[in-house]
Image: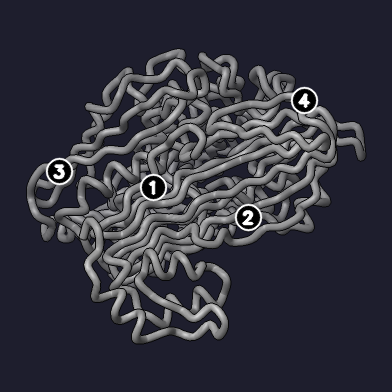
Amino acid sequence: MDHVSERPDVPVDPLLAAILQKRIEAITAEMATALIRSARSMIFNLVGDFITAALDAEGRTLAQTEHAAVIAFGAEPSLLTIREYFGDDIAEGDVIAHNDVFSRGNQNHDLGLFAPVFYEGTLQGWVVVKGHQADLGGSTLGGYDPASTEVWQEALRITPVKLYQAGEVRRDVWDLIFANQRLDIVPEDVKSMIGACVLGVRNFQGLFERYGTEVVVSHLNYVIDRSEQLVRDEIATWPDGTYRGESWMVSDGIDATARYRIVCEVTIAGDEITFDFSETDDQSPGYANMPASAALGSLRIVFLMLLTAGGIEVPPNHGLFGPVHAVFREGSLLDPTFPAATMFGNQMCDEVLESIMTALAPVLPDRVVAGWNQALGTVFACTDPRNGQRTVFFGAFHRGGPGGCYGGDGFDALGFSGSVGQMTAPDIEAYEIGNPVRMESYEYTPDSAGAGCWRGGYGTTTVRTLLADDVRTTTFGDDVAIEGAPPALGFFGGEPAGLNEIRLEYPDGSVHFLGSKAVMPGVPINTVVRGTIGGGAGYGDPYQRPLDLVVQEVSDGLLSLEKARSSYGVVIDASSGQLDKDATEALRASPRAGV
């Protein structure tokens, strides 16, 4: 390829810079829409477990569409590996695949496709589609296997390789990769990803054609530099010092009694901030480890929350993290050494969040979010009796609640912190049509939100019946009550988050409870899977919550009379549903234990 474009020195019009910023954001959004409308997998077209991004020639993020937040910041590290690997051996029409967690990937099932953007023979940028695949080989259909102890059991490792070279498919590479997975839907989804990349390249080139390369590059550089300055100005207002927080993970897939501590030491110094996870426990022998790229993405999600809580709106580009530094200790849970298993890693986003928020709560009380319910998901692998084909599908409705924050309740049924963005629970009818399952109910779990002046978000209860036999049922998550998991903490007097439960109700009437990282093979047809997912923790004294909000939630069936009284000090007449003002005033004025 020709040399990478140099940074031009041309006058910058801030208005044009804003226009180009929005245009590049629109390019990634259009790529995402194209993928949703063309992909066959529900993972893409109904749930949205992917991201699209545009980067400059240096590999710096310009814009991204963050359907799955935990993947959202995974493009830059992987592209750095690709650029190091291929050097100048990049041509127009190339499409490069990568997933390997030991060369800066975030999860082996999150396959990334990277396409260079050339204009007039010079590399000017990159477009990326990165998303979760239904299967990529390994020992288990769907990839989530708590028994895994090394990377080769989890998926085919794809180090940087060209699927397309100068516009022509590498048939040998294509056949090699897809000979190592089980589902015909996967190569079809990859074709849709390639199509989204082609669309992104064409639209990116259109910017250069309309405005000229020097104008586009100079103005997008300005956007990145301006974003970094906005962040620096904000951090400079935060109190200097070093603050420490921690969280806990229960079970590692091998030992359900194991306990692992995630520790973050946050240092604010002037206009820079460092997140140091060096004290985090050593890596686990199972698959409950988080690659450093995924851990970096998780802390960036949390940092964005801190900015947004202060009303600071910064485009999610490279400049956003210029003042942000991360330290991970090699050999720890958040930077495991080769050849560790890591499939669970993305789900540890919740533990990363809790450790950071706990650290900063004393000094940034108006920015932090109380404890989130830590995610608990399910995967079902079986043969679909309707067509005789092997299939894998997720229990995508297990959604817990985030914590409350200063001035606002937690969102109800938002899901784990790594899913913030545009990931959604799938349409129920489409879910039933596509999978051998019948949804019996999907509703909020009453009393699941941690009480507070601003309560946590409500969790959900999902009941479904499996319509296939011999179903391999796997859980991946945390906060399971039967394992003795500690609930996420409330802040400033708020109550803790709720805990989780997954139970299998067999046709013979027997019941089996699943742990957080467990597998149950051979589950028979007509088994009912009941998942009860907890809500988020509360923020602030529950007795300060407005009475009308408590009364309304009791009326809506979300809050029981007992919890309204015990947690909020609100007395409601059981027969009329009306507030008993005198009894409430007396109760709220009475002494409380521990207050």
Distance from label 4 to label 2 (Cα)?
26 Å
Q: Of callouts 2 and 1, which one flags the residue occurring earlier in the amino acid sequence?
A: 1
Q: Of callouts 4 and 2, which one flags the residue occurring earlier in the amino acid sequence?
A: 2
The residue carrying mark 2 is 425
Q: Amino acid at mark 4?
A: Gly
Q: Amino acid at mark 2?
A: Ala
Quarter the C terminus occupies: bottom left
Q: Residues within 10 Å of mark 4 (few under 14, many from 20)?
A: few
Residue 453 lies, in percent from the top left, at 32, 69
Q: Amino acid at mark 3?
A: Tyr
Q: Is residue 66 visible?
A: no
- Residue 243, disc: 3
Distance from label 1 to label 4 (Cα)?
45 Å
Q: Amino acid at mark 1?
A: Thr
Describe the element under mark 3 as helix, strand or loop. strand
The residue carrying mark 4 is 522
Q: Image point 38% across, 80% down: which residue?
A: 547
Describe the element under mark 1 as helix, strand or loop. strand
The residue carrying mark 1 is 61
Marks 2/1 in contact by CB < 8 Å: the verdict is no
